Image (cartoon, rainbow, N blue to C red):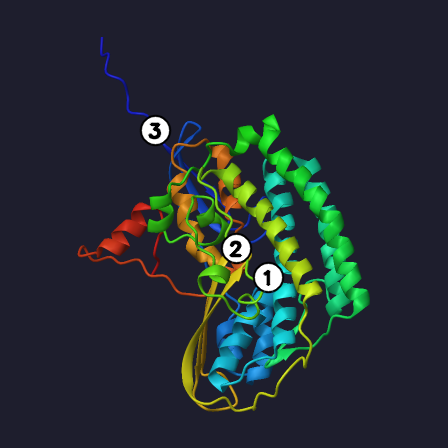
Amino acid sequence: MDTQQEPRKTFVVPIGPQHPALKEPGHFEITVDGEIVTAATVRLGYVHRGIEKGVEQRNWAQAMYMLERICGICSHVHATAYALGVEALAGVQAPPRAQAIRVLVAELERVHSHLLWLGVAAHEGGFDTLFMYSWRDREMIMDVLEGLTGNRVNYSCNVLGGVKFDVDDTQADAIRRAVDFLEPRTHHYLKVVTTDETLIGRTRNVGKMTFLEAETLGTVGPTARASGVPRDIRVDSPYAAYPDFPVKTITATAGDLEAKFVVRIQELFESYRVIREILDKLPAGDLAVRVKPRVPPGETVSRVEAPRGELFYFLKSAGGPNPDRVKVRTPSLCNWGSVLATAPGHKLADVPMLIAGIDPCFSCNDRLVTVRRRSTAETWTWAKLRQYGIEYYR
């Protein structure tokens, strides 16, 4: 009698690019042995809208409104990164009041983004009550932003050289009331995500990533800070009014999904503090300075802290009325490797939570061509990236 056991079979479970569980198209291949994930890969690039090329056909002012639409959730921070870069090339600086308003709207946008993420992540974990509560509270921030800028999503607050909208006493009072309401609600959410047994079962010790792994994979934002990496552009390289209104870097050490919940919720308290401080100490003065239609030739890099992490803009001017090159690197692209590296060893049902844990934006990160190297002489970087499941296509 042959007692030799047959080798266990593994199966590849495809998810996407069109799938009812995905809000945007991305293609995942999850290799499983039974219910346990043994490998994971992702292919992106389904939502390349040609924005970077499109801005080359528009003048410096028009380009801002296209770049704002890279992401609806963090449209203001895209416009801020672009405006700061153009102002550096033009040799001008926005007035202090404009810089403070930029930071005010950025922190309101961060609250909006984190509350939205909290609801989505809770929904992926089957906690729809938390999803509905957090999105109800998010409406208050969207109403405040609408009252301030006239828009609930793409705020169009920035102009080259400053901002469009001022903050009067009525609007300041509305913002304070919203923050005063949200702060105790946020304390409640922090208690829920750290004590609810159902949610803890889906997040604690799930997707653990050490400090060294977070550094090796180049993660940014709350994804990195949840593993103890103190990486925050607002602190490391302050911009706009952050030198006058400094923030504290929020970190955790567990590196799991629960730590990502805790970091993002604790960041809300820091945003509330900064918002109140700006309203109390808003500098007087003009809202904008003039930027000439033709920007002097040169190159610059602009870095800001989006809700998901570091947002990187490279701008090049040839001295004409249009940008010669605008290159955008968004934080989602940096964080995908952490999902693929931590998925093996977990159950297939944990994969949606792991994906939601980085707060991904497919439309944000789809802006480059990837290449699969077929030669045998691969560099360490390519081999290491492929080890973590990031595939390169030619």
Residue 301 sits above or below residue 306 on the image: below
What distance separates the C-alpha of mark 3 from that of mark 1? 43 Å
Amino acid at pointer 2: Arg
Outermost residue toward the top in this view: 1
User: In terms of depth relative to the viewer, which is nearer, 219 or 12?
Assistant: 219
Dividing the picture into quadrants, the one containing residue 277 is bottom right
Tag 2–tag 3 contact (CB < 8 Å): no
Mark sitting earlier along the chain (2/1) = 1
Q: In this view of the protein, can residue 310 be seen by the observer?
A: no
SS of the residue at dot 1? loop
Image disc number at residue 74: 1
- Badge 3 is on which residue? 9
User: In terms of depth relative to the viewer, which is nearer, 367 or 310?
Assistant: 310
Residue 214 lies, in percent from the top left, at 38, 47
SS of the residue at dot 2? loop
Amino acid at pointer 3: Lys
Residue 79 lies, in percent from the top left, at 58, 71
